[in-house]
């Protein structure tokens, strides 16, 4: 073994050990090798040009990011082909966004998704975008696209793609106990089950820390300038939770405590909604790599 090979091996080992410790602390088990049969693909894409210094979104860049990520997730050569494989003209498509006033799903992204769905052949009158009214509006939907920003959350540790469907529950507050451990059960409701075609975790300006219900503090937003896209809501949330925790450590020099994000691992191991083990997630990183944190 050469000196360079020794250095690389040691560096890779330390990086892997750090990742294992981080993942275990977040609540995601890491096996020795992972289970290839259960691998879920997550595409993390970033572009420094998607936001200006004031946080204004460049819609053209955002659309390019989404198209590239969707094509890569679905293993298609062209984005248009990928979108057409997600929806068909006879679908009723519900775009489940998030309207929390402090950090909503960007309207630019909602418009882009709607444009891509209609370009794939779904008539505009069969495409709906909503959050709080979605339990009534999406009853006839045959396909759902799940999109929301990532943020620290008082009850669940992180608000992500799994939690974005809580509004479909007849009684959302029943899922708050035990760090929202039962959130995955919402995905078995008839209005949801088997309908989700795509999960998009918005990481443009995620909130990585907060204390208290409905907490917001602009000091804990940062321009990560990314999207994480997957067919698996558990896998995409596992990646997002890892990034948020890594940012807390980077920012504070220690891991500031928040509510544990254990609902993500519970969604995997108890409810079998998806994959939370980072070793069993095929993570593809595209674009800008500065401070990628995973």
Image: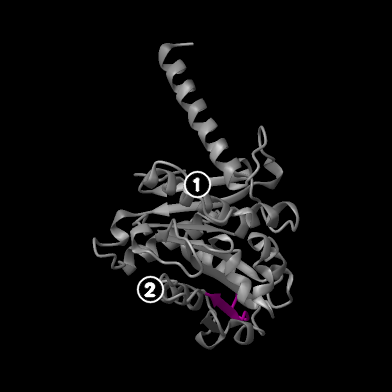
Image spot of residue 55 (x, y percent): 29, 65
Tell me: 45 left or right of 177: left
First in sequence: mark 1 vs mark 2: 2
Q: Does residue 110 lie above or below 126 as drawn? A: above
Q: Residue at x 73, y 74 (%)?
A: 189
Image spot of residue 192 (x, y percent): 68, 73
Image spot of residue 158 (x, y percent): 54, 59
Residue annotated with mark 2? 108
Q: Nearer the viewer, residue 17 or 121?
A: 17
Q: Residue 281 colored magenta?
A: no
Tell me: 288 left or right of 25: left
Q: Does residue 48 lie above or below 253 as drawn? A: below
Residue annotated with mark 1? 284
Q: Residue at x 71, y 44 (%)?
A: 37
Residue 207: quadrant of the picture:
bottom left
Q: Residue at x 62, y 72 (%)?
A: 166
The residues bearing labels 1 and 2 have C-alpha atoms spaced at a distance of 24 Å
Q: Residue at x 42, y 73 (%)?
A: 112
Farthest left residue in view: 53
Q: Which residues are magenta?
A: 88-96
């Amino acid at each position: 073994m050469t000196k360079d090979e020794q250095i690389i091996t040691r560096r890779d080992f330390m990086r892997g050990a750090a990742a294992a410790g981080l993942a275990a602390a977040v609540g995601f088990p890491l096996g020795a090798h992972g289970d290839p049969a259960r691998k879920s693909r997550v595409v993390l894409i970033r572009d420094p040009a998607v936001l200006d210094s004031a946080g204004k979104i460049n819609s053209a860049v955002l659309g390019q990011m989404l198209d590239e990520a969707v094509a890569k997730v679905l293993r298609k050569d062209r984005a248009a082909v990928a979108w057409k494989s997600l929806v068909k003209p006879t679908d009723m498509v519900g775009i489940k966004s998030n309207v929390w006033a402090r950090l909503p799903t960007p309207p630019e992204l909602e418009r882009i998704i709607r444009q891509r769905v209609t370009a794939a052949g779904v008539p505009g009158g069969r495409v709906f975008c909503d959050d709080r009214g979605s339990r009534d509006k999406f009853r006839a939907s045959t396909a759902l696209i799940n999109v929301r920003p990532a943020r620290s959350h008082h009850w669940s540790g992180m608000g992500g793609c799994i939690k974005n469907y809580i509004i479909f529950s007849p009684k959302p507050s029943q899922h708050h106990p035990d760090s929202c451990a039962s959130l995955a059960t919402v995905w078995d409701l008839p209005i949801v089950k088997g309908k989700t075609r795509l999960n998009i975790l918005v990481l443009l300006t995620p909130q990585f820390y907060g204390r208290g219900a409905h907490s917001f503090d602009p000091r804990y937003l940062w321009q990560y300038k990314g999207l994480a896209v997957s067919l698996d809501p558990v896998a995409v949330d596992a990646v997002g939770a890892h990034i948020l925790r890594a940012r807390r450590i980077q920012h504070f020099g220690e891991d500031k405590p928040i509510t544990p994000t254990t609902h993500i691992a519970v969604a995997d191991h108890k409810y079998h909604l998806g994959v939370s083990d980072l070793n069993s997630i095929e993570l593809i990183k595209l674009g800008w790599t500065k401070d990628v944190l995973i």
